[in-house]
Structure formats: structure tokens, C-alpha cells
Image (cartoon, rainbow, N blue to C red):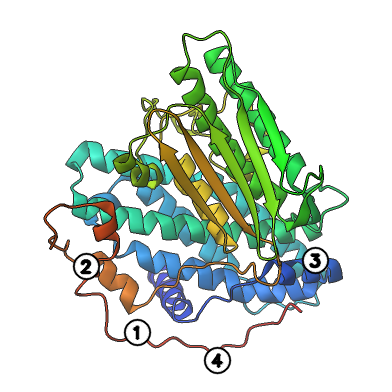
């Protein structure tokens, strides 16, 4: 019993220590160059340092969440997964990177972690639902949870990117011959658009018995627009916006024999590759537009969650999207689609923007970085500022009307004069 307690104390100490180191954001170019060199030893060394740091940062952040949320069964389950994954990676800290068995065991551990965390998104979502149903949720708590979920899911995206890239390069994951891990040096944007459209149309036809067609236009008139990117990320984002647009068009024109087409415009500039989706689905009111990126907000009825067999499973997880986008996937209802899609866009310094005209339709803009050297990971970092964001009281409006634009420029009085010092001299293995 005493031995178990000591081990627990050692792990807790290691977690707090790793949370003081700054995670190392990689660029798309760095991912690509390392994948081309394909050195398993260097990948092991880098991940052995970096994964515990990224895990530790978000695990520390859990401690600042409302107690009501932390007591939920689903949230406890998610935390236990993170604790176990941290423990498993920590076991390789002093292992020899030149030992083939160590590398093999490490790849197996990575696969175990990926499998274990496959249902993190929907399980955490269920935890929020449990808390709301049990205690209710005021604006103050809602803001804190929104802040946490953005950071939590972005952290998850970044960790899975590292792990799946290693697994694709050195594990048993089959991959497209043109790709370097999950990165395509010549990612065909039009192909991504077509794949996402077909998947969304399949689901729309299953639920609504019909779906609008699509016109694709490129700014240069070319049929091929390519750049360095992760195709599955683009397809995941576009699948979500197509799904929303199709549902809106079908419901807004339910009495018409012919549905207006969706329109995609692709433009590649010096800095941005932009994909614009236009629909004539009736749009949404201006006051509602910001809510579209709030977790748990949806214009569709919420379906019943039933664990791993939930319809939520299959479309929320990017790693299962390409293999499971049939009728079993969810058409709408949980409100996580757009917030998660925006995180995937922002992960490599892009963005997802919605502009709507109530009574007519909606335009969605997906911005992606053209230059792979500028497409750097956007990572959450736990520090004093982070902690104070969870403690901050809701600011009373100093405007006669509370609107989205005057709320967006407000600051929290408790959110900071000085940043927590972070350790930056830790030895990090270069992946160049």
C-alpha cells in the first residue's frame, strides 16, 4: 500500500514538473521534413519529451474546473484515461532509444493511447451534459467550460497529430503512398472538397431523402489547387459545414421540387488558401452567429447519448471520420461540430468564419496557411493567466445594451499583471 502511494506521489510530482515546461509547437514544414527523413530514434526521443509536457499542461488545467463538473462520472473517466496515458509514457523516460525492443514497445504504447482516447470528445461532452442536467449552468460557469473545452480539444488535436504521425511512419497504420505520414505534400483541395461533399450528401439523403447538388469554382479557373496540408483535417471541417448547409437548404426549401445548389469557391493567394461555401438555406439571425461556435448549442434536437454506440461516435473523431461516415454518423444535434471544426482550422494558424444573411443563406470561409513554414501549431499553455481565467468573476456590462461586439473587447480584471515563469532550458530533441 505504501509503495503504491509513493508511486502515485512520484507521478504527481512528475506531472507538475512537466507542466512547468513550455510545449514545443511544430510547423507543417517541420512535420514534413522529419517524415521525409524518417528516423524512428529521433521521433521516440522527441515524443518522449513532448507528449508528457502536453499531457501535463491540460491535466493541470482540469484542476481549475468547477467541482460540479469534476464529480461527473464521464469526466472522471476522461481524467483516468489521461492519468494512465501519462503514466505509460513516463515509463519510457530512461529507456535506451537504440534498443529496437524499446522502440517497438513505444509504438505499441502509442497505439494503446490512441485507442484509449478515441472516445474522449463524446465522453467529455457527456460529462458536460450530466453536469447541466444535475446542477444547471449559469453564464459564468458556461464561459469557463467554453474556455476549457477549446483548450482541452486543441490539446487533444495536437497530441493525436504527434501520435498518429509516428504511428503512420513507424507503426502498422496503412497510408496513402503519396503522403508523408498524414501530411500530403501535394494536397488536392478539390479532391478534399469532393470527398467531404459525398460523405455529407450520403448522410443528408439518409435522413432527409434528398440533398442539394454542388458547384465548384476556382479563382484561377484551374481544376487542381494543391499545397502542403493534412487532407483528413480539411475533409473533417468541410464535412461539418456541408452537413449544416445541406440540412439548412433542405429544411428551408422543404416545399420545393428542386433545391438550390451549394457553391464552393477556392482561391489560393500568397499567404492564404481560402475555401468559401455558400448556401441558400435561410441563414441565421445576427445575434445567433456567435452562438454557432458554443459547445452544446445546436438548432437541431439533441439525440440520446448511449455510450460507445451513440450516433455521436463516428463523426466527432477525425481519426475515425474517413472510415465511418455512413448513415450511422450523426446529422445534427450536439452542437460540437462547428466548434471542433474551427479548432482544426486554427490548429495550423487558419480559421473558420461564418457570415449569414437571415432570410437568404450563409457563407462559411475556411482559411488555411499556404506556406507550410508559417503553419505552426497553436498550443494551449497552462500558466498563472490560465488559472486566473477560471477564477475571474463575470464582468458587469458598461454599455446600455449587451452585444457580441462590446463583450468581445472586455477584459477580466483578475487576468493578469505578470506571467508565471516557465522553464525553457529543458533539453528538447530537435527533429530537423
Q: Residues within 10 Å of mark 4 (few under 14, many from 20)?
A: few
- Residue 70 spot, x, y in % from top left: 29, 53
Q: Residues within 10 Å of mark 1 (few under 14, many from 20)?
A: few
Residue farthest to the bottom, as pictured = 425
Is residue 107 positioned above or below 34 on the image?
A: above
Examine the rendering and report whether any part of residue 171 can be seen.
no
SS label for mark 3: helix
Is residue 381 positioned above or below 363 on the image?
A: below
C-alpha separation, residue under disc 3 versus residue under disc 1: 35 Å
Specify which label sits upstream in the sequence, 1 or 4. Answer: 1
Specify which label sits upstream in the sequence, 3 or 4. Answer: 3
- Residue 384 spot, x, y in % from top left: 32, 78
Q: Residues within 10 Å of mark 3 (few under 14, many from 20)?
A: many
Closest to the observer, 248 or 342: 248
Examine the rendering and report whether any part of residue 180 can be seen.
yes
Specify which label sits upstream in the sequence, 1 or 2. Answer: 2
C-alpha separation, residue under disc 3 versus residue under disc 4: 26 Å
Amino acid at each position: 500500500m505504501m509503495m503504491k502511494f509513493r508511486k502515485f506521489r512520484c507521478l504527481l510530482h512528475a506531472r507538475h514538473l512537466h507542466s512547468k515546461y513550455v510545449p514545443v509547437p511544430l510547423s507543417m514544414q517541420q512535420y514534413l521534413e522529419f517524415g521525409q527523413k524518417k528516423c524512428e530514434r529521433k521521433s521516440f526521443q522527441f515524443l518522449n519529451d513532448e507528449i508528457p509536457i502536453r499531457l501535463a499542461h491540460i491535466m493541470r488545467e482540469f484542476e481549475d474546473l468547477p467541482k460540479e463538473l469534476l464529480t461527473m462520472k464521464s469526466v472522471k473517466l476522461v481524467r483516468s484515461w489521461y492519468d494512465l496515458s501519462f503514466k505509460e509514457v513516463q515509463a519510457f523516460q530512461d529507456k535506451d532509444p537504440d534498443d529496437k525492443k524499446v522502440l517497438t514497445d513505444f509504438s505499441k504504447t502509442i497505439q494503446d493511447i490512441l485507442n484509449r482516447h478515441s472516445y474522449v470528445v463524446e465522453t467529455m461532452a457527456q460529462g458536460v451534459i450530466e453536469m447541466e442536467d444535475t446542477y444547471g449552468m449559469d453564464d459564468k460557469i458556461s464561459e469557463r467550460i467554453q474556455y476549457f473545452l477549446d483548450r482541452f480539444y486543441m490539446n487533444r488535436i495536437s497530441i493525436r497529430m504527434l501520435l498518429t504521425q509516428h504511428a503512420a511512419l513507424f507503426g502498422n497504420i496503412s497510408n496513402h503512398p503519396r503522403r508523408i505520414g498524414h501530411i500530403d505534400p501535394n494536397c488536392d483541395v478539390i479532391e478534399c472538397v469532393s470527398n467531404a461533399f459525398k460523405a455529407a450528401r450520403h448522410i443528408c439523403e439518409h435522413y432527409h431523402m434528398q440533398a442539394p447538388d454542388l458547384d465548384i469554382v476556382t479563382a484561377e479557373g484551374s481544376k487542381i489547387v494543391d499545397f502542403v496540408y493534412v487532407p483528413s483535417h480539411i475533409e473533417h471541417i468541410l464535412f461539418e459545414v456541408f452537413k449544416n448547409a445541406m440540412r439548412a437548404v433542405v429544411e428551408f426549401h422543404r416545399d420545393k421540387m428542386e433545391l438550390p445548389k451549394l457553391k464552393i469557391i477556392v482561391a489560393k493567394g500568397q499567404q492564404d488558401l481560402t475555401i468559401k461555401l455558400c448556401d441558400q438555406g435561410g441563414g441565421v439571425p445576427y445575434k445567433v452567429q456567435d452562438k454557432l461556435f458554443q459547445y452544446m448549442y445546436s438548432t437541431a434536437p439533441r439525440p440520446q447519448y448511449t455510450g460507445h454506440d451513440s450516433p455521436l461516435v463516428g463523426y466527432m473523431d477525425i481519426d475515425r471520420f474517413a472510415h465511418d461516415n455512413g448513415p450511422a454518423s450523426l446529422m445534427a444535434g450536439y452542437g460540437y461540430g462547428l466548434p471542433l471544426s474551427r479548432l482544426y482550422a486554427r490548429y495550423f494558424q487558419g480559421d473558420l468564419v461564418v457570415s449569414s444573411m437571415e432570410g437568404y443563406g450563409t457563407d462559411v470561409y475556411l482559411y488555411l496557411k499556404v506556406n507550410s513554414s508559417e503553419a505552426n501549431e497553436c498550443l494551449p499553455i497552462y500558466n498563472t493567466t490560465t488559472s486566473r481565467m477560471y477564477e475571474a468573476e463575470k464582468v458587469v456590462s458598461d454599455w446600455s445594451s449587451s452585444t457580441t461586439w462590446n463583450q468581445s473587447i472586455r477584459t477580466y480584471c483578475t487576468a493578469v499583471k505578470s506571467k508565471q515563469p516557465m522553464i525553457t532550458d529543458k533539453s528538447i530533441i530537435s527533429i530537423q
